[in-house]
Amino acid sequence: MKNIVIQLANVNKRFGALQAVRNVSFEIQRGQVCGFLGPNGAGKSTTIRMIMSILLPDSGVITVLGGSALDAKDRIGYLPEERGLYRKMRVADFLRFMAKLKGISRSDADKRIRWWLERIELPSVSQKRCEELSKGMQQKLQFIASVLHEPPLLILDEPFSGLDPVNRRLLSSVVRQLKENGTTILFSTHQMEQAEDLCDQVLLVHKGEKVLDETMNQIHGRFDPRTILAEPSNSIEAATQALHNVADIESFRWSLEQKAFEIRVAQGVDTQLAMASVMRATPLRRVELQRATLDDVFVTLVGGSVGEIESAQKSGKLQATHD
């Protein structure tokens, strides 16, 4: 139990007729980075709010750092989904205030503030008012507020949302550095690439239920890749004709992005034997198995990619619910 930082046992939460979280159980070990994945309405933010004791579960048990989040509030850093700043305050004053709430002295806070503003690439904003910052800058500022007190547990709700690719990469590097320093991190995200890059453990929820709780190594082992990438050394037309005659292939298509054929291996066929069949059929520059991505796993378990589900919700084809 000493190494378990967050533990949920048979947790349920209902809003009227909506069962937002249904019988969810999981554990997060000390020092792990855990990605909490799922589309809008899956129950991610509701679960995080219950972990933080903002909401109480209808039933089940939640333990955070050996007790409740309220008892351990000074040892937790929290970036909520609903961003909020004291808009008229200057950046340095806002961060000093947040540091004071965590019991950090003025002199120590000023050192940490200078360091973090440099680290997060906001070195010249300390005297600006919060409302003068762009949305991306405001988000980075709130991230600083969540880590100023050097918490052993960091909970981030959609930390990459609204950031451009440069700042997503920057924040990913910060999360990686915090992990190396021993911080336990739980973050919800729609950014599958960030989750795959950063996470030791992945939780996937759908319609309030947990559908996946595994390490990245377990996921890659369980979701055996069945797609071959094959780059032909002769013409695409000749390779296409040759591939039509390979019995081990279920389907194939040319990928302009990959500059190769994406070949789906038929069920029941060993992928190594299929690769050998493809190599015999047509000359190739390269051939490799395409490892299943988290988006592939999502499609397998939920039936649509995150992007497809989000688009459907925006167009009204799917009813968005409490997240």
Image (cartoon, rainbow, N blue to C red):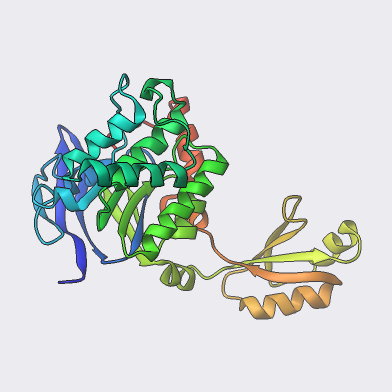
Residue lying at 33% horizontally and 47% vertically, measured from the top left? 112
- Residue 286: % across, % down: 78, 70
- Residue 176 location, x and y as percent? 43, 59
Asked if 74 appears above or below 224 in the picture, the reply is above
Give the quarter of the image for residue 218: bottom left
Q: Nearer the viewer, residue 232 or 29?
A: 29
57 displayed left or right of 40: left
Tell which of 263 and 191 is nearer to you: 191
Q: Residue at x 48, y 58 (%)?
A: 196
Q: Where 104 falls versus 64 (above or below)?
A: above
Q: Is residue 63 above or below residue 132?
A: below
Q: How many marks?
A: 0
Q: In the figure, residue 1 lies in which quadrant?
A: bottom left
Image spot of residue 167 (x, y percent): 52, 42
Q: Residue at x 29, y 44 (%)?
A: 146
Q: Nearer the viewer, residue 12 or 114?
A: 114
Task: Give the percent coordinates (x, y) of residue 14.
Answer: 15, 39
Give the left or right position of residue 127, taking residue 241 as reference: left
Q: Quadrant of the C terminus?
A: top left
Given residues 30 and 257, the one toward you in this image is: 30
Look at 59% across and 68% down and name the residue there.
226
Q: Is residue 139 left or right of residue 169?
A: left
Q: Is residue 49 visible?
A: yes
| Residue 207 in sight here | no
